[in-house]
Image: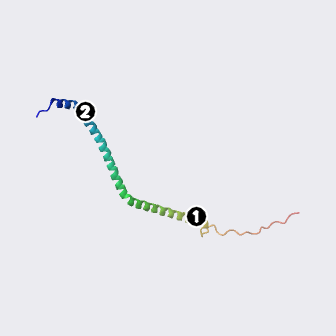
């Protein structure tokens, strides 16, 4: 079986076009493949994050509870300190206050 001369001529003419189409196909394939890989990684990350949300939510509430407890303790200590300062202590170190006494005035001179 012999390949006709017109087929060889057609193959020679189409070789640059085929090479260009092959190059464009490889470029498009690389771009689409990279986009698919990026989308797949994003989807996998999303699924992992979605699965970890309940645990992270419990952790967040636990941390909020711990912080609120600490703030509550500090507020109670401050209220106690203010109440103690307002009432005063039972220890009176200054001693008894002097009692008022009547002063003797001199008789007026005439």
Apparent side of residue 84 relative to residue 46 in the rendered image (left or right): right
Q: Nearer the viewer, mark 2 or mark 1?
A: 2
In the depicted view, which residue is nearer to us: 85 or 45? 45
Which residue, as the protein is rendered here, is positioned at the far left? 1
Q: Earlier in the sequence, mark 2 or mark 1?
A: 2
Report the residue marked by disc 1.
82
Residue 70 in percent (x, y) is at: 48, 62
What kind of element bears circle 2?
helix
Q: Quadrant of residue 13?
A: top left
Apparent side of residue 53 relative to residue 14 in the rendered image (left or right): right
Residue 54 in percent (x, y) is at: 39, 60
What kind of element bears circle 1?
helix
Please give the name of the residue rendered at 34% of the width and 51% of the height, measured from the top-left corner.
43
Residue 65 in percent (x, y) is at: 46, 63
Residue 97 is tagged as none
Please give the name of the residue rendered at 56% of the width and 64% of the height, measured from the top-left corner.
79
In the depicted view, which residue is nearer to us: 59 or 81? 59
Residue 11 in percent (x, y) is at: 19, 32
Please give the name of the residue rendered at 36% of the width and 53% of the height, measured from the top-left corner.
46
In the depicted view, which residue is nearer to us: 24 or 53? 24
Report the residue marked by disc 2.
17
Please give the name of the residue rendered at 50% of the width and 61% of the height, measured from the top-left corner.
71
Quadrant in the picture for the N terminus: top left
- The colour scheme applied to this rendered structure is rainbow
Q: Is residue 48 above or below residue 8?
A: below
Which residue, as the protein is rendered here, is positioned at the far right? 110
Apparent side of residue 68 relative to residue 48 in the rendered image (left or right): right
């Amino acid at each position: 079986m012999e390949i006709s001369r017109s087929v060889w001529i057609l193959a020679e003419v189409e070789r640059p076009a085929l090479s260009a189409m092959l190059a464009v196909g490889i470029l498009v394939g690389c771009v689409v493949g990279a986009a698919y890989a990026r989308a797949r990684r994003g989807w996998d990350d999303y699924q992992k994050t979605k699965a970890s949300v309940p645990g992270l939510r419990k952790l967040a509430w636990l941390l909020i509870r711990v912080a609120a407890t600490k703030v509550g303790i500090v507020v109670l200590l401050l209220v106690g300190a203010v109440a103690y300062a307002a009432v005063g202590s039972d220890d009176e170190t200054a001693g008894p206050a002097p009692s008022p006494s009547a002063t003797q005035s001199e008789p007026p001179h005439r």
